[in-house]
Amino acid sequence: MGFLTPLYPIIMDRFGLSLSVVGAVSMAAAMASALSQPFFGMLFDRFGGTASVYLAPLLTGVLVSCLGVAPSFTVFLVLLCLGCLGSAAFHPRGASITPTLSGSHPEFGMAVFSAGGNLGFAAGPAAIAFFISLWGFGSTPILAVPAALVAGALALLMPRGRTASRGAGRVSLRSLLSNRRDLAMLGRLVFINFALTVGVRGLSTFLPVYMAQKGSAVTSIGALFTGMLALGALASVFVSQLSRRTGKRVLILVSAAAGAPLAVAGYVFFPSAAGTVLIVAAGTVLTFSNPLLILMAQKHSGNSPAMASSLIMGVSWGLAGLAMVPLGALGEAVGIPVMMVIGGAFPLLSVLSCLKIPRD
């Protein structure tokens, strides 16, 4: 899924897209990969579905790798949205069985799960930029091969009989609605992750376009976002271990309260070296709290761990994707730099919700 970031300026030029339509592409990807997650979460809470852990990445890997050979913008969108459904099917089930496989260290296990996803997402920009720079946009289907190999390895190595979610049963959305206190907590967590994701997604959607306009090569764009997301992945492992001492609330608060000023400062000073460093720091800080939010959601989910995970990774991501359309329109009206500053400051709206999270 990380392939998409450096492709924005390419498809903008290839298909003659406006900045608003680029935002709509980001929105479509978010809706397909995120807003459909609660459906898959409810399905997996009821019936299991361990096969999705390896079949879903296969679907995503093959279809998204074929974006480079799409003959039209319509085919590009169809391939993208179908590939995103694989991502939607993977995350709720993967997140719900991770604590089960983590023994007495669920925070560390969830951090590894989140870091693995972020490292893969981080590798995406560099990988596809490398292929495009050497062999052209049409070479991307080659990248489906490692995806197929990973899916096969998962099918062979997945432990049998140990993949039931903790507390899973025959549950439905009704079980989440039955406890108002837990429902209110889930609402706060979803809003916090939504605000954080707007900051990150706005950065990854529009900064590549701005960099391309300033003459940056696609490989430079890929390297910047790979470095940023990789650092965020590694930081999430450290932060998750740290949360056992400090509690989750203070670290989630730091993610929102510190990440936004770093992003704004980075946009103000970009494209200087200081601006680049600040943007990398902002992306790292805004993303390291993701596994903590997932674990807190599962704690307040009753017997619906996959559903709770899908709300954090699905609904909040999807709503953040929807926000890219008005941000794109704002960028056309006032310019990309001003729009990015506004988007970078958006996570500050979640600070009050962070303060209302109970100490753990």
Image: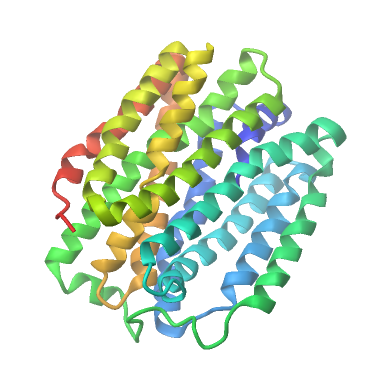
Q: Nearer the viewer, residue 315 or 16?
A: 315
Q: Position of residue 72 (x, y in %)?
A: 74, 41
Residue at (71% x, 48% y) in the render: 75
Residue at (69% x, 57% y) in the render: 61
In the figure, 79 relative to 179: above or below?
above
Residue at (40% x, 62% y) in the render: 310
Count of marks overlaid on the render: 0
Q: Nearer the viewer, residue 220 or 199?
A: 220
Q: Position of residue 284 (x, y in %)?
A: 44, 36
Q: Is residue 250 something one can see in this rendering?
A: yes
Q: Position of residue 136 (x, y in %)?
A: 84, 34
Q: Residue furthest front?
A: 245
Residue at (38% x, 67% y) in the render: 105
Query: Coloring scheme of the render?
Result: rainbow
Q: Quadrant of the C terminus?
A: bottom left
In the picture, measured across the screen, residue 277 lies left or right of residue 178, that is: right
Tell me where residue 25 sits by quadrant: top right
In the figure, 7 relative to 3: above or below?
above
Tell me where residue 244 sits by quadrant: bottom left
Q: Nearer the viewer, residue 109 or 36?
A: 109
In the figure, 8 relative to 108: above or below?
above
In the figure, 180 relative to 325: above or below?
below
Q: Is residue 339 something one can see in this rendering?
A: no
In the picture, measured across the screen, residue 238 lies left or right of residue 4, that is: left
In the picture, measured across the screen, residue 157 lies left or right of residue 311, that is: right
Q: Residue furthest right?
A: 135
Q: Position of residue 129 (x, y in %)?
A: 73, 34
